[in-house]
Image: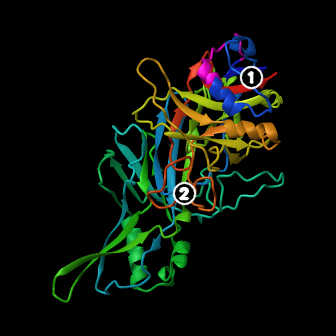
Amino acid sequence: MITFASQTINMSHFSKRKFNIFALPFFALLIASSCDKDMNVMLDNSIGDKVAVSSVDSFTVNTSTVQLDNLPSSNSGLLLVGKADVNEIGSVKSSSLFQLGFTEIDNLIPQTAEFESLTLVLRPNRARYYYGDTTKNQKITVHQVTQDLELTTLTGGIQNLAIPIYVTRPSIFSKQKFAYNNTPIGQITFSPEIKSTDSLKIDLDQQIGQSLFDLIQSNDLKVSSNQNFREYFKGLALIPDDNNTVILGLSDTVQVNLNYSYVGTDGFTKNEHKELTIVDRSFQYNNIEYDRQGTAFEALNINNKELSTTATSGLTYVQAGTGTVAKLTFPSLKDFISDDKISINKAELIIETSSPINTMYPLANRLMLFVADHNGVPTSFIETPYVGSVQLASFVPGNDYGKNSTYRFNMISYLKRLKTSNIYDETSLYLSVPQPTAESSNPMYPGANTSSAAPLGLLNTFNTAMIAIENNKPAVKLNILYTKFK
């Protein structure tokens, strides 16, 4: 005898039995495609006696909110600068630090030239990315970095922990801090024009500019190479004001112009400049901070990395930048699918989100699922069935009649591997914003790049997805269609 059942796993124990009635043509199709046992099946007028509908077993899904650690932030393609507040989850703040170098190592400044000014030019990134309220004035101060920016090579430490899959090379991590002079050398207050192509021009300290001009004009060793210059001038830090309301994504093609003038041989005044920029993007990074005080997630931090949804009244969320993910575990799922009489035909994980569309806080247009080991370190990902690359679930809008927006994952490969191997033993799933990587050899994110037009994701945005709540629990469901042989 063959039994067909449709099973839903959601955020609570099933308290009711559910029954599904299948039309005859569907039975014929499903039997033809799903029965892998050596048997003959005849569908005739006695179908009701030969096929029954199974009741639904009870499963538990454990959920929590997790704070990821060691998020690479250098060479991300964007300078994230600003601060934004979200009532339910607190505030986020990002400062950007970077080294500078000359685009050309030469001294073509005439001896008769005179220093005019030192200016920093910031441009919006190509995507015009922002997160927060752009209707208010914003303030950014510029500071001189006083500590060498250094890359860190992540290791497993004395506990020999796994390296997160999103760490592919030495980097500067978003939690790291480097010293800078508290006295600003420049500042600007402005109204963000998101659709505008206008740049931000910030006048920097005249004394610093004059000293730099004199060094170049005198062919000083401090400016004879970019390496020597970085020892003399360690970089700049862009710091947002605490009253800011938006985080802006700026292009990493910054310019610092050393402006000077001189009288040419034709008797006319010439205005020219010597240009500095970010010559090694590995030494540009965003320092990201969060403040969850007064929210349900106040206890979630780098030292207390997991918070059960029972402590947040069912609320959980996913946020890029801060590395906030939703953890999912299915304690009794493997026991169910390990039954030799069970054949899985279809499995779909459905995540409902309450995040509104077209607001000042961009939602995640795609999500992925990391697979975390027993130490909570993401070491792999849920693949696209029969393809092998990371599976990305696109945002599917809801409607005006109360239907939530969703993200949907095809879980058939995951369940089959869960049944036939121990690769997923003692693991959990992390629902996360994806991030393309610069490593073309990594199959996780094929086709990515590190240019200023690099794809936006986990490490260089703050895109957020609030998981909807159903009966005080996250609205997450795993629908399984299976055949049971008797």
Q: Secondary structure at mark 2?
A: strand
Residue at point 79%, 51% (across, down): 161
Q: Nearer the viewer, residue 399 or 198?
A: 399
Indicate the quadrant containing the C terminus: top left, top right, bottom left or bottom right.
top right
Write down the region rendered in magenta: 13-27
Circle nearer the N terminus (1, 2): 1
Query: How many C-alpha atoms fall within 10 Å of the one at disc 1: few (<14), some, or many (≥20)?
Result: some
Image location of residue 253, percent across then percent down: 42, 63
Query: Going by the image, does 237 lie left or right of 116?
Result: right
Which amino acid, mark 1? Thr
**Residue closer to the observer: 99 or 422:** 422
- State whether residue 293 is above or below residue 129: above
How far separated are the C-alphas under marks 1 and 2? 41 Å
Mark number, residue 285: 2
Q: Is residue 425 visible?
A: no
Q: Position of residue 54 (x, y in %)?
A: 74, 16
Residue wearing tag 1: 60
Name the side, left or right, on which 116 lies relative to 287: left
- Per the rendering, the mark at residue 305 is none
The answer to whether residue 205 is magenta is no
Taking depth in this image into account, of 455 and 333 the one nearest to the observer is: 333
Magenta stretch: includes residue 18:
yes
**Magenta region, main secondary structure:** loop
Where residue 293 sits in the image (x, y, percent)? Answer: 59, 31
